[in-house]
Image: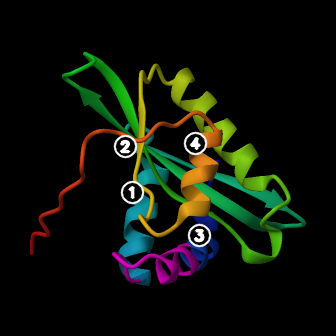
Amino acid sequence: MAFHSDIPELVELLQTLFEQEAEFEPNSEAQRNALRKIILDPKIGVVLVARGDEKILGMVNLLFTESTALGSKVAILEDMVVLDTFRGEGIGSKLIDYAIGEAKNEGCKRITLLADIENTKAQSFYQMKGFVKSKMTPYRLLLD
């Protein structure tokens, strides 16, 4: 799990992630504020990290909410990223497996995630981990 002192490294990881995704742009201050809130309040969620040689190699967030459809707690998986130089070493697989275990431990009955429509490698990875494509289509309304 991430600590408050990890936030600068996590912001760097998010910058890498958001530069790859067409829908998002890096914003260090926004990412720093959100990470701080998540790390300080376990009711919001948890930031999971993979560490190696005193460095964070990857991260994933689980955010918690209640589902009326399931009548139980559910999780939203966000910000799955591994440093470029460590991809292909199984770190992402371990992170996602750990996240699934954490969601189960929290009593979650479902994990939902969004994958970039052009990132077929990520989509294949999630499918390999048991995620299935939803029949729901995401829509967004950005508010000021």
Q: Quadrant of the C terminus?
A: bottom left
Cα distance, mark 4 to mark 1? 30 Å
Q: Say which residue label 3 marks.
A: 10
Type of the residue with mark 2: Ile
Q: Are marks 1 and 2 in contact (CB under 8 Å)?
A: yes
Type of the residue with mark 4: Gln
Asked whether residue 3 appears in the rendered view, the answer is no
Label 2: element kind: loop
Label 4: element kind: helix
Q: Residue at x 58, y 58 (%)?
A: 122
Q: Earlier in the sequence, mark 4 or mark 2?
A: 2
The answer to whether residue 22 is magenta is yes
Res 73 → quadrant? top left
Q: Earlier in the sequence, mark 4 or mark 1?
A: 1
In the current view of this chain or complex, which residue is farthest to the top? 71
Q: The magenta stretch spans which residues? A: 14-25
In the current view of this chain or complex, which residue is farthest to the right? 53
**What's the mark number on residue 37?**
1
Q: Residue at x 71, y 53 (%)?
A: 92
Cα distance, mark 2 to mark 3? 17 Å
Type of the residue with mark 3: Leu
**Label 4 environment density (alpha carbons within 10 Å; few <14, some 14–19, many ≥20):** few
Q: Say which residue label 4 marks.
A: 127
Q: Say which residue label 2 marks.
A: 44
